[in-house]
Amino acid sequence: MPDTDIRKLDQATVERIAAGEVVERPASVVKELVENSLDADATRVDVAVENGGVDGVTVADDGAGMTEADVRAAVREHTTSKIRDIDDLEGGVGTLGFRGEALHTIGAVSRTTIRTKPRDPDDGPAEGTELVYQGGEVQSVEPVGRPAGTTIEVAELFFNTPARKKYLKTRATEFSHVNRVVTRYALANPDVAVSLTHDGREVFATTGQGDLPSAVLSVYGKEVARAMESVEAPDLDDGPLDAVGGLVSHPETTRSTREYVSTFVNGRYVTSKLVRDAVLSAYGGQLAGDRYPFVVLDLSVDPGQVDVNVHPRKMEVRFSDEAGVRRQVHAAVEDALLDAGLLRSSAPRG
Ligand code: ADP
Ligand code: MG
């Protein structure tokens, strides 16, 4: 064999590198676990983190739960119950997850304890299962008494990847990332009661009542909630979007970061400069420089018109008809602001 310095990495090294791409910080763990709870049709999702998530992340839900066989399978590599093959993906996925890598990779760089019991009593014995998974290996599997649903506790994050651990930021910074993630899912799912607790203190809790204004009230507080106008364009027919709906704030109720501009496509949080710019342009220059409104906007679009699979963290989207999306979003937001008398329009109505 010719001499070469190029060699194949061992499996453990490959896995830890891969894990680093999915699990960057505590907020990435929170995102994956909350998505799993929502995919399991939970009606409540309780997120508790310690020390910004660095010392622990726990996500508890009342969703479908798992049998012992399910949970053993779930922590293996590339295992998912959500799609079967590439055809399912091409058809547009209805779930938040589909890559089948989150539980496996989180467990590769932490000590993860899963306690779960299926909601459907036909699915097995009356007791639940507790599985401990650490550094990529199943440590123990035991029966446990608990209600239906799933609780996943992630401790000792990055215990075996000290370089990654060193790059974690302060408690406040890590927590702000966690807060942002949980906030997005709470706003995208007003029909789910979502709570966030940090070091034992409740940060917010939505009621799960189902309406967006009450979710906004729980998350952002009274002052912001009062300054929101609803955007209602339920059946659009002159472009790629079927509907645009949500809430946008008055032009004087703003913040200096973009983080309160939350946009969703078919209920999935996305970052899209195109959509954001279309929203901001609808304010017609009434936003002070470098100020951003509070926005919670969901676009309904045929899954065939949008590619959500461009980014490994699944936040960016690409629309096939960008100009159409821009025009429809601009018009929907502008109408809402005009109806509320919040725009100095050149041709005032009424
Ligand atoms: P994916 O979400 O892409 O399918 P994950 O690794 O996140 O991959 O989860 C693997 C599988 O474990 C899921 O497909 C699902 O069947 C199961 N699972 C994970 N979390 C939960 C949960 N909270 N409730 C019920 N099932 C879950
Ligand atoms: Mg998942």
Image (spheres, rainbow, N blue to C red):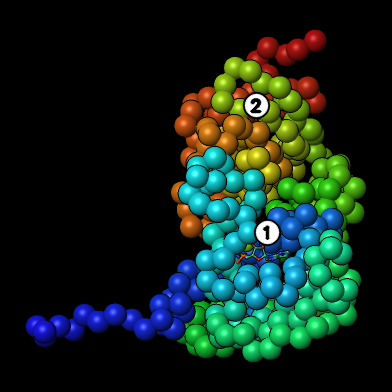
Label 1: how many Cα within 10 Å (few below 14, some 14–19, many 20+): some
Q: Does any atom of ligand 2 lie closer than 8 Å to the CB of label 1?
A: yes
Residue furthest toward the left?
2
On the rendering, which quadrant does ligand 2 occupy?
A: bottom right
Q: Disc 1 on helix, strand or loop?
A: helix
Quadrant position of the C terminus in the picture? top right
Q: Are marks 2 and 1 in contact (CB under 8 Å)?
A: no
- Estimate the x, y position of residue 146 in percent, counting from the top left: 88, 76
Q: Nearer the viewer, residue 57 or 133?
A: 133
Which of the two residues, 350 or 127, is positioned nearer the viewer here? 127
- The vertical placement of 112 against 278, above or below, is below
Which quadrant would residue 327 be assigned to in this image? Answer: top right
Neighbor class of circle 2 (other Cα within 10 Å; few <14, some 14-19, many 20+) is some
| Residue 92 can be seen, yes or no | yes
Tell me what residue is drawn at x 69 percent, y 73 percent: 69
Q: Nearer the viewer, residue 113 or 110?
A: 113
How far across and how far down the image is residue 132, in percent?
Answer: 68, 84
x, y percentage for residue 149? 82, 67
Give above or below for 249 relative to 115. Answer: above
Residue located 90% across and 54% down the image: 207
Tell which circle, 2 or 1, labels the residue nearer the N-terminal end. Answer: 1
| The label number, if any, that marks residue 35 in the structure image | 1
Q: Which residue is mark 2?
A: 242
Type of amino acid under label 1: Glu
- Which quarter of the rendered picture does the N terminus lie within? bottom left
Dot 2 falls on a residue whose secondary structure is strand
**Residue at image location 69% in from the left, 39% down from the top:** 297
Quadrant of the rendered structure where residue 153 is? bottom right
Give the distance between the C-alpha atoms of the residues marked 2 and 1, in whole angstroms: 25 Å
